[in-house]
């Protein structure tokens, strides 16, 4: 019975709150990184397929691919900023 009482005590301690906010922030950034990772994979895959189908348009497709990668990567950076704000706020 005393073990249960000890386990319930840290729920109100400031250290537990800090630890849980760090876990939550890390989890949020992990989820925020999944979307851009999948998005970049789709963008690059479709660009390679487009370049294989029309090699004469490879320059335009490559430029558009890099723009798509940049915009998609911006989502990961926004997630990282939110992670930092949650961690240190």
Image (spheres, rainbow, N blue to C red):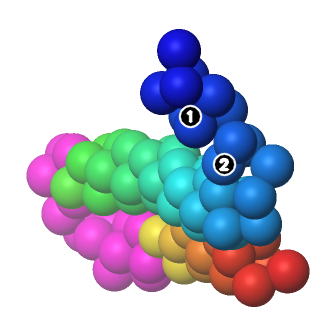
Q: Main secondary structure of the magenta part?
A: helix
In the displayed image of the protein, which residue is found farthest to the left? 52
Task: Name the residue at 81% across, 49% down.
Answer: 12
Residue 67, percent from left and from top: 55, 76
Furthest-right residue in view? 89
CA gap, disc 1 and disc 2 = 6 Å
Mark 1 is surrounded, within 10 Å at the Cα level, by few (under 14), some (14 to 19) or many (20 or more) other residues, namely few
User: How many numbered discs sit on the rendered protein?
Assistant: 2
Q: Is residue 36 left or right of residue 62?
A: right
Instruction: Using the image, tell me which numbered label, if any, was put on residue 7.
Output: 1
Give the farthest residue toward the top: 1
Q: Compared to 8, does 38 lie above or below?
A: below
Question: The C terminus is located in which quarter?
Answer: bottom right
Can residue 65 be found in the magenta stretch? yes
Residue 26 in sight from this viewpoint: yes
In the rendered view, does 35 fall on the left or right side of 59? right
The residue at the point 47 percent across, 54 percent down is 30
Q: Which quadrant of the view contains residue 65?
A: bottom left
Q: Quadrant of residue 66?
A: bottom left
Where residue 75 appears, as percent x and y from the top left, is: 65, 65
Q: Residue at x 55, y 56 (%)?
A: 23
Q: Residues within 10 Å of mark 2 (few under 14, many from 20)?
A: few
Residue 60, compared with residue 6, is above or below; it is: below
Checking the image for residue 26, the label placed there is none
Which residue bears the numbered disc 2? 10
Q: Are marks 1 and 2 in contact (CB under 8 Å)?
A: yes
Q: Magenta residues?
A: 49-66
Q: What percent of the width, then of the height, locates residue 78?
A: 71, 73
Q: What residue is at 28 percent from the left and 71 percent from the top? A: 58
């Amino acid at each position: 019975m005393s073990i249960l009482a000890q386990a319930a005590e840290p729920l109100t301690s400031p250290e537990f709150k800090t630890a849980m906010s760090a876990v939550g922030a890390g989890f949020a950034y992990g989820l925020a990184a999944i979307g851009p990772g999948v998005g970049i994979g789709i963008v690059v895959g479709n660009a390679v397929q487009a370049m294989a189908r029309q090699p004469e348009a490879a320059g335009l497709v490559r430029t558009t691919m890099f723009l798509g990668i940049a915009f998609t990567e911006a989502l990961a950076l926004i997630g990282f900023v939110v992670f930092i704000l949650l961690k240190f706020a």
